[in-house]
Amino acid sequence: MKNLVFVLAFGLLNACTTNDEPGVEPEPEVPEESRWITIAAAKMGENPGDGNGGTLIYSLSSEDAKNPEMSIAPFDNGFIVPSNRTARLQASEDGKLVFNISYAGDTGGNYTKYTVEGGQTFTPTGSEVSIAPYVGTAPRWIKLFDGDKTGAAVYVSAEAQFDDNGTPDDASDDTYLRHEATMGIVTLDLQDSKIINFQESSVALTEAEEAQGYYISRIDMPTLNTAGDKLYIGARLSKVDPSTGETDRSADLLPSKTIVLDYPSLTNPTVITSGVGIGNTNGYRSINAFEYNGSVYQANQSDPNGSHILKIGANNQYDDSYVFNLDAALGVEGAYVLAWRPAANGKAVLAYRHNGSADGVAGAQGFFALVDLNARTATKLDAIPYDPDFYLFQYQGFAVDGNEIYLTQAPVGQNGNIYVVDTETGNVTKGAELVNVEGSHFIGAF
């Protein structure tokens, strides 16, 4: 019989306590050999799967997360994370802290930090700080992998430039020249809750690319290199018709690009170009690039040949000798990386869709695969159940504990489970039940 977890998470972790006073509930504790796993749930706004009704989080021990007899209901009993829409969450490497920057609304851009204490108990720690004056109220941010010390948030604004051929009363004869793309980046001290640095820079493509109307229109997912002296920022390109200055949505995608900055100064931006992948490298809601074994591995999206895992070497250039195409590895067409996360052994869990995905209530059906960065292989995890309404486009996080990776599986509006993947063996363990509500979905484990 399943143990439904209530608001106060009574007895959630079966931890030992010396408090035997009648009527006093024991404080949840994580067993010494375990760690906290925080589950994130996105509530429906107006449409199923939109996640715009807010974000709730709930934590349980890794031991309980692996227990299929456990049942948790974050939508009923979870902690409401401050955010007008879907919160942008990060967790410390040991799972003891959750970091949040509110997305949009009156609190947009506010950084808060919480100590994870089990169930719905997330205790604010440290002071709040707003990064909205630097990067706006809907920031794109990420936690750098530097021992939970630093966060980085970015934005880019692009403005079309024209020559002055037209008359003062009619500028329609002005000739399009290029877009001026201005990038801003702020670094945030996650421990002391303060701004470290902010810089704005102009970031340009080649003259030939800009003459065709291409420009950088969105950036995201800063990643620190192994040496700790460069920051890589993923980029999406857009294009206008240079003869009119109007948006050109039918244009071919350019090869994948990444902005490289000096760190920690955040100066001297350059743009590097892949000779392997095509399309965007900014990702969406989840971290899109990770340092491993001296290099950074990065997913691309919207590649007409299917998503790739790209490699940036220690020389801060793309390593085009590394070719890892997910269409070929998975035996599908149109593979599209939605989210992914490697363990320290170079093996990763990857969320994806493809051209054969069913059309569900909120979008294309998603799947999980086990990826090996060294062998350049990818295998669909068939032990996880799939449903046309299993929607992963907004998926944010995987919890990594050694070689194990925790994930959430539940179709929109339906119950599901936590699953734990042993990346060394490929074994998959079905864990605690996730109780869902109408139109809502789960967006990850942290």
Image (cartoon, rainbow, N blue to C red):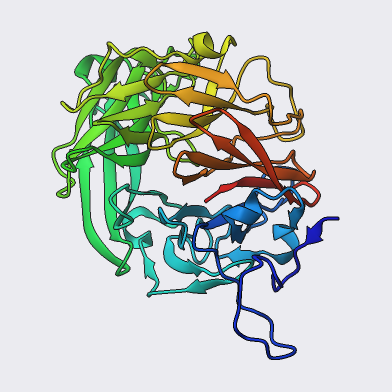
Residue 52 visible? The answer is no
Image-quadrant location for residue 338 = top right
Q: Nearer the viewer, residue 241 or 321?
A: 321
Q: Nearer the viewer, residue 239 or 124?
A: 124
User: Residue 332's spot in the image, x, y percent?
Assistant: 59, 11
Name the residue: 62% across, 65% down.
Answer: 80
Residue 322 in which image quadrant: top left
Residue 150, compared with residue 356, is above or below; it is: below
Above or below residue 194? Residue 23 is below
Q: Is residue 164 above or below residue 122?
A: above
Residue at the extreme bottom of the image, as rendered: 21
Indicate the position of residue 429 as horizontal and vertical percent values.
65, 38
Q: Count the marks: how many?
A: 0
The furthest residue to the right: 1
Question: Which one is nearer the viewer's eye here, 384 or 63?
Answer: 63
Q: Position of residue 439 (x, y in %)?
A: 77, 46
Seen in the image, is 318 located left or right of residue 62?
A: left
Quadrant containing the N terminus in the rendered view: bottom right
Q: Is residue 273 left or right of residue 427?
A: left
**Viewer can see residue 384:** yes
Seen at 18% across and 36% down, the residue is 269
| Image position, residue 430 (x, y; %) | 69, 40
